[in-house]
Amino acid sequence: MSDKVYPWALLTVTSLGVLLVTLNLGTLTVALPVVAAYFHAGAVATSWVLLSYMLFNTVLILVFGKLADIYGRRTLYLIGLTEFTLVSFLCGLSPNIQVLIGLRILQAAGGALVITNTTPLIVDAFSKRKLGSALGINVLVASVAQLLGPVVGGYLVFTFGWRWVFWFNVPMGIVGVICGIFMLRPVTGQSRHQTIDYLGNLFLLLGLGGLIFAFSEGGVIGWNNAPVMTGLLSFVVFAGCFGWWEIRVRHPTVEFALFRNRSYAMANLATFLNSLARSSVVLLIALFFQVMNRENTFMAGLKVLPITVGMIVASPLVGMLSSRFSARLLSTAGLSGTCIGMLILLLSVGIEGADLWIGIGLALVGIGTGVFMTPNTKSIMLAVPQEKLGMANGLRSMLQNMGGVLSTAVSLMIVTHVVPPRLKDAIYGGAQVWLSAADRKIMASGFRLAFLVMLLLTIMAIAASYLRGSKTDGIRE
């Protein structure tokens, strides 16, 4: 294969992996009420079907980012895609909610390997002039997956049952592995002298796990209970241990020295805050339409389409604009659009006949996200040396995923915290739950409070993006 053709062949293969992994998250989002009803699971267990994947995916992304720098990206990418496909099949055979949560943890490992290696493979293959367009296409594919996810998931659950949400991944995964074996060139690791910071990653897992556990339990059983306090204490202790260890170990998981570059530091902070603000929007709106309007999974999936349609429209356009305008201008403009969308959602949720405004709000959130992600990712990846691309992308992906898992945990905690105990499990009850007018009013107030918090976080992300400086002072040209 010629050098001119290879980058686009690589983009095709890696896009298939991104499509598979991202599609899985979207299909499961609308299926949660059905999964909960099938296993007779409560609110906490049901939320951990999502949170278990997000938590381990977040931590493992950092580990696998360093492994990619040491051992090469192609091999790890193919291992991840193979493992993700196999475990997807097993998830569909789960006999109970506990086994499903355990398999989701294994699935997270495969997803982390795919996501960690995708962006560095693209950066390695494309010239700086064409990198913006390639990353834009990569974001576009992820956007398409987010678009298809809720609709495909809703249709599969409504027609065939929840198990097909996982079995649907298998044929696409097999095709992706076969194409990857024959089309991807071997990429030798460039940091073989480094070692994996296992202890630092363990501290990160325990600390972040404690925080997520506290958020998921606090809104249901109360913040003064021993399990919640233990989770918060675990976060404080192990987060402190992680920071203490990382400045002393020879080959750290996170090189804090890179954050001396203001553009790099602010771009990563904006990544985290944006993900924290908008990651749970699809989940909340899907649950809202199922529990408040008693709509089935397929219709709820259709109702969240505007957010990913907005991303699809914005992503290719901003890929071309990224070579003409600064990352600060494009990223900040995108976050501003997201902010307006969040405000519309805050004012529309719970209002009779406001479905159109909810759709407009979702579309603006999607457009803003699409405009933000490509230039922000490009500025991060061009600000580090070539041999640290895997670690830099791993950190970027970890912050994005960390924002996602915290967003899910915090938003669900907010919604469940304001409702009485008798209504907490109703969040996942879907169309089978009947709510009185008074109960609907209480439930709507919880959703509005969640969107208020996300609006404030988006404003903070705008500030971080703007403070990166007027130009990218990258290390690598």
Image (cartoon, rainbow, N blue to C red):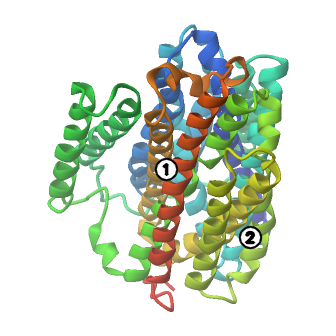
Three-letter residue code for mark 1: Asn
Mark 1 surroundings: few (<14), some (14-19) or many (≥20) residues within 10 A: many
Q: Quadrant of residue 436?
A: top right
Mark 1 or mark 2, which has the lower sequence index? 2
Three-letter residue code for mark 2: Asp
Front one among 26 and 222: 222
In the rendered view of the protein, which quadrant contains the N terminus?
bottom right
Residue of label 1: 401
Q: Residue at 75% across / 21% down in the picture?
A: 164
Q: In this image, 229 relative to 434: left or right?
A: left
Q: Quadrant of residue 25?
A: top right
Residue 265 can be seen in this image: yes
The Cα–Cα distance between marks 1 and 2, rounded to whole angstroms, is: 33 Å
Front one among 149 and 431: 431
Position of 29 relative to 421 (above/below)? below
Residue 6 can be seen in this image: no
Q: Nearer the viewer, mark 1 or mark 2?
A: 1
Secondary structure of the residue carrying numbered label 1? helix
Coordinates of residue 348 in the picture (x, y in percent): 70, 53
Q: In this image, 281 relative to 65: left or right?
A: right
Q: In this image, 412 relative to 152: left or right?
A: left
Q: Residue at 49% across / 19% down in the picture?
A: 422
Residue of label 2: 3
Q: Which mark is residue 417?
A: none
